[in-house]
Image (spheres, grey):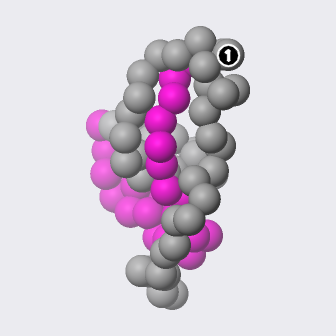
Amino acid sequence: MRLFVALQPTDPARDALAALADDVSGVRWVPAAQLHLTLRFIGEVSEGDAERSPRRSSGCASNRFFSS
């Protein structure tokens, strides 16, 4: 199992990013629902190790940085 830390964009940001993909050819795009910004790729881990890792970071705060 591949483990990583990522940010999920808001729906408007995801829609804007997906719209940009229409103008770029020669690449394989993931479905818009799977778009994310990887902050840290941890790598292959066992299912047990993945289950023991925190699913959400407590104490994280954010401000919106995309507006529609």
Q: Amino acid at mark 1?
A: Gly
Is 50 on the left-hand or right-hand side of 24?
right
Extreme residue toward the top, this view? 46
Inspect this view and state whether residue 15 appears: no
Where disc 1 sits, the SS reads helix
- In the displayed structure, would residue 11 be above or below residue 32? below
- In the displayed structure, would residue 19 be above or below residue 50? below
Inspect this view and state whether residue 56 appears: yes
Q: Determine which quarter of the picture holds residue 28.
A: top left
- In the displayed structure, would residue 25 be above or below residue 41? below
- In the displayed structure, would residue 10 be above or below residue 5? below
Extreme residue toward the bottom, this view? 68
Q: Nearer the viewer, residue 55 or 68?
A: 55
2 part of magenta stretch: yes
Give the residue at x 41% y 29%: 42
The image position of residue 13, as x and y in percent, is 50, 71
Disc 1 designates what residue?
Answer: 48
Give the residue at x 52% y 65%: 60
The span picked out in magenta is: 1-26
The image position of residue 41, as x and y in percent, is 38, 33
Q: Determine which quarter of the picture holds residue 1.
A: top right
66 part of magenta stretch: no
Give the residue at x 51% y 87%: 68
Give the residue at x 52% y 23%: 2
The image position of residue 55, as x and y in percent, is 65, 43
Count residues near mark 1 (Cα–Cα under 10 Å), then give few for <14, some for 14-19, many for 20+: few
The image position of residue 67, as x and y in percent, is 48, 86
Extreme residue toward the front, this view? 59
